Image: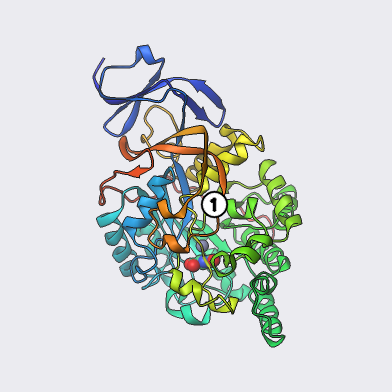
Amino acid sequence: MARADLTIKGGWIVRPEGTFRAGLAIRDGKIAVMAEDDALPPAEQVIDASGKVVMAGLIDPHVHAREPGLTEREDWRTVTMAAAAGGVTTIFDMPNCIPPVNTVDAFTLKRQAAEAKAVVDFGLIAGAGITHIGHIPALAAAGAVAFKTFLHEPYPDRMVEFGGLYATDNGTLMELFAAVARTGRVQCVHAEDNAIVEHATEKLMKAGRRDPLAHCESRPVIAEVEAVAQTVLLAAHTGVRLHLVHVTTGSAAELVETFRARGIRNVTMETCPQYLVLNEETMTRVGPYARMSPPLRPEAERAKLLARFKAGTIDVLGTDHGPHTAAAKERGRDDIFQAPAGAQGLETSLPVMLTLAARGEFDLPFLTRVASQTAARLFGLYPRKGAIAVGSDADLVIVDPHREHTIDRRRFYTKERDAAHVFDGWKATGAPVMTLVRGTVVMRDGEVVGTPGTGRMVTPERVAPAPPEVIR
Ligand code: DOR
Ligand code: ZN
C-alpha cells in the first residue's frame, strides 16, 4: 500500500452517527484510509491518539478577524492562531471591518490579508446592506461564503466599520433577501429589532442607568424574538436561505420551531457557548468585558435555550469571537454604554462544550454535528470540510475528553488576551490537544505550531437552488 504522510493510531473516531475505534492515514492533506490501526499503510509520521478522541476540526461560522483596519483588536495571524489553539480548523469572518466588505475590492483586500497570515482555513462572509445591494452578485462570484445583514444601526462610534452592512426597514430587507436568494448563498442575519433597542436604550439612559445590567435591559428578549419573527416571514416570502446568527433566547428558538412546523424549511439557527452556559450574572460580575450584542440573558431564557439546543432545534455552534482592546473595554467601567460590544470565544468554545458533554448534557457525536458537520453542509463545503471520511480534508482535532483544567486567558493566542474575561477562571473538563489542518499539525499540546500564510480560503462548492416561496 502506498505510504502515507501521517497516520493517527489508537484513538476513538467521533462522527455524528457514533464513536468507534479506528485509525486514519493522511496523504496530500486528505484522509486516504480509515481502518483498524494494523491495516494502515506505513507513514512518515505516526501520531499516537491512545486514550483520546478524534473529531472533525470545528468550523466556526461566526468570527470577527478585524483585519484590515482594526488590527489593534486582532489580526489574521492572531485570530487563526486562537482558532488552532481551540481546535477550530475553519473560520468564517464577518464583514464589519475597515473597509467593510461590501464591494469586491474590499473583499479582495481582506482575502489578501488573510492569505498572507492565516494558520487555519477561512471563508469570508460579505455584507448585504442598504447601500450596496447591487454588489451582491459580484461578491458571490468572488467567493463569498455567505452574506450578513445587521438589523440594528451601527453603534455611534463604529459607523465606518458597519457602514453599508445593515438594514433597518423591512422594505430594504426584503429587497436584500431577494438579491441574496438569487445567488443561492446563505443570508446571515443579526436579529435584534432596531426600534426596540433604540427605544429601550434611550429610556435607560434618561433614567441615568449606566450599570452593566442596563446593557441587557437595553436589548431585551423581545427585541430578538420580534426581529426573528419578521425576518423569518421575509425569508419565507423571498425563499432566501436564512441563517439566524447568535440566537440567544429559548423563546426565539421556540418561535422558529413553530415556523418550521408550519412548513418553513429555509431557516437555520446558530448559538454560541456563552449563551448556553452564562447568564446576566456574568454581566454583573465581569461588567464591560461581558458586554456583547445580543447580551447575556436572564437564567430562564438561558436554560430554555440549552434545552432547545439539546433537542436539536439549533443547527450550528459559532462563537461570535469579537475582540476589543482592554483599554476600550475599560471605558465602560463606570458607564456600560461606553464599552464596545464583543468578546473573544475561539479558545474557549471547545473546552466549554466538552465540559457540557462530560456533564452528560449531550454526547460527542451530537457535538461534532453542531460544531462542524452542519456548518459544512449548510454553507456548501460538505464533505470536503466537516467530515471524517475518506477523501475529506484532514481537518482534525484530537481531544482529551477527561482533562480537568482551569481556563486561563494568559495562555490565549488572541491578541487582546487581557480583554478575554468572559470564561477566564472557568473550570473545564476536556481540552483539544492537537489540531491538524489539511494534514498539517498546527497545534500540539496547546502550542500553536502552524505557519502563517498556509490557511486557504474556502468557497461553496455547490450552490443549492433557493427553496420555493412558502408564504406569498
Ligand atoms: O457583540 C457584538 N460584537 N455583536 C456584534 O454584532 C458585533 C460584534 C463586533 O463586531 O464587535
Ligand atoms: Zn458577530
Circle 1 residue: 425
Q: Is mark 1 within 8 Å of ligand 1?
A: no
Residue at the spot 29% in from the left edge and 43% down from the top edge: 449
For label 1, the crowd category at 10 Å Cα-Cα, with few meaning under 14, some 14 to 19 and many 20 or more, is: few
In front of the other: 131 or 10: 10
Q: Quadrant of the C terminus?
A: bottom right
Task: Name above or below for residue 81 compared with residue 238.
Answer: above
Q: How many marks?
A: 1
Q: Amino acid at mark 1?
A: Gly
Q: At numbered mark 1, what does the secondary structure look like: helix, strand or loop? A: loop
Residue 289 sits in which quadrant? bottom right
> Is 240 situated left or right of 10 in this image?
right
Look at the image and tell me whether residue 460 can be seen.
Answer: no
> Is 143 situated left or right of 201 in this image?
left
Task: Name above or below for residue 411 compared with residue 5.
Answer: below
Please state the horizontal and vertical placement of residue 348, each as a whole percent of the image. 50, 49
In front of the other: 278 or 196: 278
Residue at the spot 61% in from the left edge and 33% down from the top edge: 363
Q: Quadrant of the N terminus?
A: top left
> Is 112 situated left or right of 382 in this image?
left
Residue at the spot 64% in from the left edge and 55% down from the top edge: 278
Please state the horizontal and vertical placement of residue 86, each as a whole percent of the image. 44, 46
Task: Name above or below for residue 227 compared with residue 424.
Answer: below
Residue at the spot 61% in from the left edge and 74% down from the top edge: 171
The extreme top residue here reads 38
Please state the horizontal and vertical placement of residue 52, each as a whole percent of the image. 46, 27
